[in-house]
Image: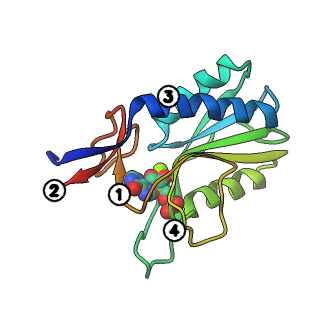
Amino acid sequence: MKTGKVEKLITSDAIAVRVSTLANTIVKSMPTDLMIVVLLRGSFVFAADLIRALHAVGMHPQVDFLTLASYGRSTTSSGKVDIVRDLTEDMKGRDVLIIDDILDSGRTLHFAKHLIEGRGARTVKTTVLLEKPGKQLIDMHADFVGFQVEDKFVVGYGLDYANYYRELPYIGTIIV
Ligand code: IMP
Ligand code: MG
């Protein structure tokens, strides 16, 4: 059981405001009938809020889930990404929005984008709640970014440390 205290970095109110402005930006550049792919597990809370914000601006997405595992956060690893649980919907001809929690090295989102393009999607755009600027090891940027955060390990609002802290309504960092 993890008992570390968490220092708040982004409040739930700030997240709610940002999610709603993101939806306003997304609706201007994507068709209403889009296919959303939620990358599990970290982005489930963000996705739940974002799809309702998209509803509020008149979008009618379908939703699918993709579980990926990325290995080797260390600099020496090959950075392999594996499919733990695959999509169930057909991506062919679809306009897809991939939702992820955080863009760090960029490997997970890069893998997901290429996988979905390879399945015949018409367009693939990406959104992340958080981005750590300058950490991307490969050339990967998200189309819609919630917040930039400094290079600290963050938890809450779906993001975990050892599968704990996902339930926090805010984003924070663990203080030992
Ligand atoms: P990337 O493939 O290096 O971009 O890493 C992306 C994934 O690593 C995210 O979807 C998260 O699940 C996880 N991750 C990266 N940084 C953090 C963090 O600070 N806190 C929690 N999870 C993180
Ligand atoms: Mg993740």
Q: Are marks 3 and 1 in contact (CB under 8 Å)?
A: no
Q: Mark 3 or mark 1: which comes first in sequence? A: 3
Location of residue 170 by image quarter: top left
Residue under circle 3?
Answer: 16
Horizontal relation, residue 170 to residue 47: left or right: left
- Tell me the quarter of the image containing the N terminus: top left
Estimate how packed mark 3 is, as few (under 14), some (14 to 19) or many (20 or more) residues with alpha carbons within 10 Å: some
* Residue type beneath disc 1: Phe
* Residue type beneath disc 3: Ala
Q: Mark 2 or mark 4: which comes first in sequence? A: 4
Residue 82 in the image, given as x and y percentages of width and height: 52, 60
Residue 106 in the image, given as x and y percentages of width and height: 57, 62
Query: Residue placed at 63% from the left, 54% from the top?
Result: 112
Q: Are marks 1 and 2 in contact (CB under 8 Å)?
A: no
Q: Nearer the viewer, mark 4 or mark 3?
A: 3
Alpha carbon distance from label 2 to label 4: 24 Å
Q: Mark 4 or mark 1: which comes first in sequence? A: 4
Q: Is residue 115 visible?
A: yes
Label 1 beta carbon less than 8 Å to ligand 1: yes
Residue under circle 2?
Answer: 176
* Residue type beneath disc 4: Lys
Alpha carbon distance from label 1 to label 2: 12 Å
In-front residue for pair 4/15: 15
Badge 4 marks a residue whose secondary structure is loop
Quadrant assignment for ligand 1 = bottom left
Query: Residue placed at 66% from the left, 19% from the top?
Result: 55
Q: Mark 4 or mark 3: which comes first in sequence? A: 3
Residue under circle 1?
Answer: 153
Alpha carbon distance from label 4 to label 3: 26 Å
Q: Are marks 4 and 3 in contact (CB under 8 Å)?
A: no
